[in-house]
Amino acid sequence: MAVLSTQSPEPCVLSVSGVQKSYAQRSVLGGVSFTVRTGERVALMGPSGSGKTTLLNCLGGVDRPDKGSIDLMGRKMETLSSDELAAVRRTVIGTIFQFFHLLPTLTAFENVELPLQLLGVPTSERRQRVSALLERVGISARQQALPAQMSGGEMQRVAIARALVHRPNLILADEPTGNLDSRNGTIVLDLLRELSDETGTAIVLVTHSQEAAAICHRALHLRDGLFTEPSTSDG
């Protein structure tokens, strides 16, 4: 006889319900719904133009959906002001981009430290947290290097540290290995998986890569703004 688990499911970090988005009367998202729980990694996959980046932008509060609801840690994103959305991005969300988006005039240490400066974290705590994370991502020896002095793999590791330093509940990653060779791509994916497991940070990862999707607990496939298979988490 099967034994049913009595463990409670992890709490929900993100709940997306019926999200629609159009640009110039062209529907990009046709009503998508899914949930992401604490520590869960979800891949968003689909051909170019399927709505992946638009959905990621809505999740991050960069775009607002035309219809539907996005609940992030109990906050209804569609009801927040621009200033409130900016505060959510600074505290609850971390973002990793394909092209790194490091500030070129700041060192690796300073790029990672910046989110904590914006939050007013005291200097001593900033230094401790940044140093620990740079060590964890294997880049502490390069902490005084500028982005132009680093390889793509090094820059992406710095970007991961920057996304995690303020201890967000959710990481949004947009093709994080798309600009890396296969070796560095594997290193970055292993790092994301390990750090997510260690910190309980949820990840929504936009990717075309099966290797990237393989570090996720499940993949959601978008086509023409709709999921092509059941997309809600059953916990």
Image: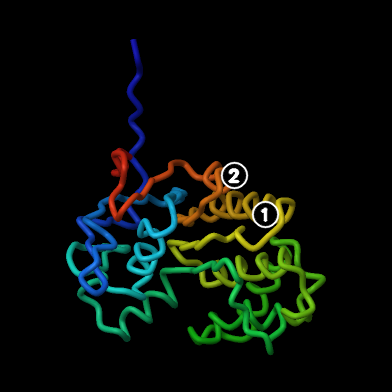
* Residue 174 tag number: none
> Which residue occupies 70% across, 79% down?
109
Residue 154 occupies quadrant? bottom right
Horizontal arrangement in the rendering, residue 221 relative to residue 234 (left or right): right
Residue type (three-letter) at the residue carrying disc 1: Gly
Q: Tell me how far mark 1 sits from mark 2, CA to CA.
A: 9 Å
Mark 2 nearby-residue class (10 Å; few <14, some 14–19, many ≥20): some
Q: Secondary structure at mark 2?
A: helix
Residue at image mark 2: 211
94 versus 29 height, above or below: below
Whole-percent x, y for residue 136 in the image: 70, 61
The relative height of residue 43 versus residue 84 in the rendered view (above or below) is above
Nearest the camera: 95 or 177?
A: 177
Q: Name the residue furthest bottom.
A: 105
Pick whichever, 160 or 118, lies toward us: 160
Single out the residue that lies furthest toward the right: 141
Q: Secondary structure at mark 1?
A: helix
Judging depth in this view, the residue of 115 and 22 nearest the camera is: 22
Q: Three-letter amino acid code at disc 2?
A: Glu
Q: Residue at x 43, y 61 (%)?
A: 170
Q: Which percent across, then down, holds residue 189?
A: 62, 52
Residue 202 percent across, percent down from the top left: 45, 55
Asked if marks 1 and 2 touch (Cβ < 8 Å), the reply is yes
